[in-house]
């Protein structure tokens, strides 16, 4: 049905909207809520610039005093190392979590870099003798601590460089494998690299150049420190040249700047441990470790806030969608129940107004011939009006021709002519209202109008209004069609009653005529036959042979006339007599008929399997009587007369057959066999009235079956009739 198809399309569209709403939080997050994909704004750039500017200012202020020794503070190292480890581990954890969502290989590299940094910070802290262990790491030498520091501050910038050069947009290079497996591999790689470098700086200590002479720097330290320092410097332009600067790229550049100042003060410009450069460099390192962590934590808070808002918006959207479907379903149920349009509109108008969020909503019926609009149902904030009565001009609907084309109309109430309708709309807070046409079958039947003080009608609101208007138009069209059908049905019922009365009158007249035929024709016929019999009995000796022959002809003709009257009366009663249906045992009925009609016939009768059938037993008996009598009669002159009776099931009907080897007939005249008074043989050859087969045809037709015959002159005939297996 067109109604079902239209609503199915709307339902599928609405279901797609629900699925989209449920994915709001998931779809919104990758689009711009993460540091790696969020474009850096002007505020982010200004903040980063001021951090770098302050760092530069502090660096150039402290650089001249970098070699100034200060009081050694042994507690500074464990505090500093612990803060670095915690900060780097938390940052790595946050990056791994973002990688699980975004599947970005660049994030995986950064997470691995921060995890490696935390592991190297652990090794660096353990390498200070007496800090955690009395002798530091097992097998370490005097250069182990310094080499762990330089390798640490060389590998991390190298990983940042790898992130920066990945297609210019590392966040868009997706990892195809499962994220958990990739994370475990990277954790294993970071552990293996940190462990390998630690073993290198302990067990392979004799192979490494001397960079420290006690707490003072050796000459080779400047070369090694400068090399690791240059990696941080190289990372800066590579991060800058990325095609899209994300917030993450921006703060990584700030981190690399801090690392540049860290290595410069703590390893290049200073003279050894516990001087101003050494302490200031460590401070820069700690600040560098905390930059990205703080930004990630702020981002997570912002993300959760936005997800909470998206979840609340999704819940509201789902609630609106559920109410939207409920209204459409209510209209469908009302249409199925064949409720009038007024009842359908009354059931949905107030929920529709609340769903649209407007001051007033009205379902209107448009009478184009009268140029008028009539309320079907209207809902305001305080009351609901249902039923016809309020009528006004179509000019309140805007451009009617545009409505007929399916175009919505935006009407400014304040620009309408003054009148009670305009004043009522303004009093209810409707300054602007929208008119959505209700069209079915290309005909404008009405309109759904709604409005409030605002002149803004969002797309979702318009979509809801169009869906409901379409369904209401279909409901109105079906109500009109139902009204017409009911009118036609009432008219047909009246005609049927009139025709039934006429048929009853005709049947009464026919019954009177049959009685007249039976009584008025039989009386003179009995007189003719009676006087002829008296003449034959009393005066036969006085008559010559010709007179006696003529008298015999009169009596035989009177007998045939009586039989003809009986057959005609039986034929006429077939059309009026109701069928008394029951299960008929055809085999028993046929044997009963054979016993009645066989008489002194010398024909052999073979009865095959006969299927039972539902029908009127008395009428079906007439069928068998006529067919078997005819078979016996027309085969009586054969040398060895034979009659075969049988049946078979064909599809949903049972076909019965009576076959003889008698006179047969020419198939050219088969159509005349079942007509009244139609005979293919003379009465002298085979006596009869020509009504028997007509009775067969009428009885079978009343049972919902059909009759036909096949034959050949001198080779016999086969008469068939079919009856449905189930009662008609």
Image (cartoon, rainbow, N blue to C red):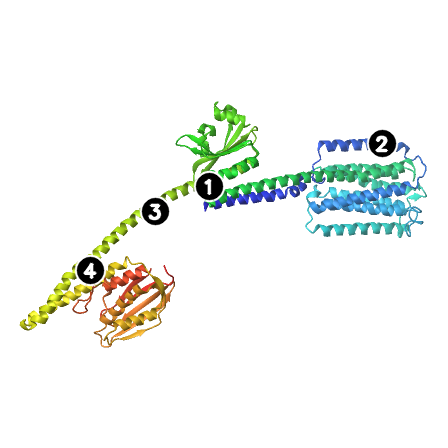
Q: Nearer the viewer, residue 526 or 189?
A: 526
Which callout, 3 or 4, points to the residue nearer the camera? 4
Please give the label number shown on residue 493.
3
Mark 4 secondary-structure assignment? helix
- How many marks are shown on the rendered structure? 4
Quarter of the figure with residue 666: bottom left
Residue for badge 2? 58
- Residues at badges 3 and 4 in contact (C-beta under 8 Å)? no
Quarter of the figure with residue 485: top left
Which callout, 4 or 2, points to the residue nearer the camera? 4
Q: Nearer the viewer, residue 273 or 542?
A: 542
Residue for badge 1? 475
Residue 582 in the image: x percent, y percent? Answer: 36, 63
The tag earlier along the polypeptide, 2 or 3, is: 2
Residue 653 in the image: x percent, y percent? Answer: 36, 63
As drawn, 45 above or below 670? above
- Alpha carbon distance from label 1 to label 2: 78 Å
**In the image, is 642 to the left or to the right of 367?**
left
**In the image, is 159 to the left or to the right of 447?**
right
Q: Nearer the viewer, residue 457 or 193?
A: 457
- Residues at badges 3 and 1 in contact (C-beta under 8 Å)? no
Residue for badge 4? 518
Residue 158 seen:
no
The tag earlier along the polypeptide, 4 or 2, is: 2
Residue 587 seen:
yes
As drawn, 457 above or below 663? above
How many C-alpha atoms fall within 10 Å of the one at disc 3: few (<14), some, or many (≥20)?
Answer: few
């Amino acid at each position: 049905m067109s109604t079902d198809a239209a609503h199915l399309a709307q339902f599928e569209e609405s279901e797609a909207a629900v699925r989209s709403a449920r994915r709001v939080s998931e779809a919104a997050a990758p689009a711009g809520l993460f540091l790696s994909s969020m474009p850096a704004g002007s505020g982010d750039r200004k903040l980063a610039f001021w951090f770098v500017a302050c760092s530069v200012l502090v660096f150039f202020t402290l650089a001249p005093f970098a070699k100034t020794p200060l009081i050694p503070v042994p507690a500074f190292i464990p505090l500093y190392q612990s803060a670095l480890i915690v900060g780097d581990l938390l940052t790595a954890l946050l990056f791994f979590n973002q990688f699980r969502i975004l599947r970005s290989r660049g994030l995986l590299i950064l997470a691995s870099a921060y995890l490696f940094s935390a592991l190297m910070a652990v090794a660096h802290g353990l390498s200070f003798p007496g800090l955690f262990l009395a002798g530091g790491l097992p097998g370490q030498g005097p250069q182990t601590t310094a080499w762990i520091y330089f390798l640490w501050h060389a590998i991390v910038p190298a990983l940042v460089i790898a992130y920066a050069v990945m297609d210019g947009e590392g966040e868009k290079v997706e990892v195809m494998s499962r994220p958990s497996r990739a994370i475990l591999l990277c954790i294993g790689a970071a552990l293996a690299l940190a462990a390998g470098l630690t073993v290198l700086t302990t067990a392979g200590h004799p192979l490494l150049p001397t960079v420290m002479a006690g707490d003072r720097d050796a000459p080779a330290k400047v070369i090694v420190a400068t090399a690791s320092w240059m990696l941080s410097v190289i990372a800066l332009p590579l991060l800058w040249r990325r095609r899209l600067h994300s917030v993450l790229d921006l703060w990584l550049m700030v981190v690399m700047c801090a690392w540049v100042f860290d290595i410069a003060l703590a390893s290049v410009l200073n003279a050894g441990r516990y001087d101003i450069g050494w302490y200031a460099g460590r401070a820069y390192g700690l600040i560098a470790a905390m930059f990205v962590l703080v930004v990630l934590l702020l981002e997570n808070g912002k993300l959760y806030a936005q997800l909470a808002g998206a979840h609340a918006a999704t819940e509201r959207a789902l609630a609106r969608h559920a109410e939207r479907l409920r209204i459409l379903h209510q209209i469908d149920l009302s249409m199925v129940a064949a409720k009038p349009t007024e009842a359908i509109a009354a059931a949905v108008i107030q929920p529709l107004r609340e769903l649209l969020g407007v001051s007033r909503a009205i379902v209107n019926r448009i009478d184009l011939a009268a140029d008028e609009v009539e309320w079907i149902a209207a809902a305001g904030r305080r009351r609901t009006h249902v039923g016809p009565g309020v009528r006004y001009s179509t000019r309140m609907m805007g451009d009617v021709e545009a409505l007929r084309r399916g175009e919505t109309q935006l009407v400014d109430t304040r620009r309408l002519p003054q009148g009670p309708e305009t004043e009522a709309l303004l009093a209810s807070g409707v300054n602007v209202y929208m008119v959505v046409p209700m069209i079915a079958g290309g005909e404008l039947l009405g309109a759904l109008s709604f409005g409030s003080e605002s002149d803004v009608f969002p797309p979702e609101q318009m979509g809801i209004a169009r869906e409901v208007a379409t369904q209401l138009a279909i409901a109105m069209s079906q109500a009109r069609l139902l009204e017409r059908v009911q009118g036609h049905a009432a008219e047909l019922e009246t005609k049927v009653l009139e025709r039934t009365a006429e048929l009853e009158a005709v049947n009464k007249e026919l019954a009177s005529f049959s009685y007249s035929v039976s009584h008025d024709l039989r009386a003179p016929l009995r007189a003719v036959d009676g006087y002829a019999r008296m003449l034959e009995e009393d005066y036969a000796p006085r008559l010559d042979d010709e007179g006696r022959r003529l008298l015999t002809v009169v009596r035989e003709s009177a007998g045939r006339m009586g039989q003809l009257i009986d057959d005609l009366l039986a034929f006429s009663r077939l059309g009026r007599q109701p069928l008394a249906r029951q299960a008929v045992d055809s085999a028993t009925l046929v044997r009963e008929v054979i016993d009645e009609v066989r008489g002194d016939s010398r024909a052999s009768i073979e009865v095959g399997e006969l299927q039972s059938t539902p029908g009127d037993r008395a009428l079906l008996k007439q069928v068998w009587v006529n067919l078997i009598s005819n078979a016996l009669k027309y085969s009586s002159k054969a040398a060895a007369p034979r009659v075969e009776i049988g049946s078979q099931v064909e599809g949903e009907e049972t076909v019965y057959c009576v076959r003889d080897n008698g006179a047969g007939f020419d198939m050219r005249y088969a159509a005349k066999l079942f007509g009244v008074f139609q005979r293919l043989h003379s009465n002298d050859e085979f006596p009869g009235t020509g009504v028997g087969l007509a009775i067969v045809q009428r009885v079978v037709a009343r049972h919902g079956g059909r009759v036909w015959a096949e034959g050949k002159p001198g080779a016999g005939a086969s008469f068939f009739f079919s009856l449905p297996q189930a009662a008609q």
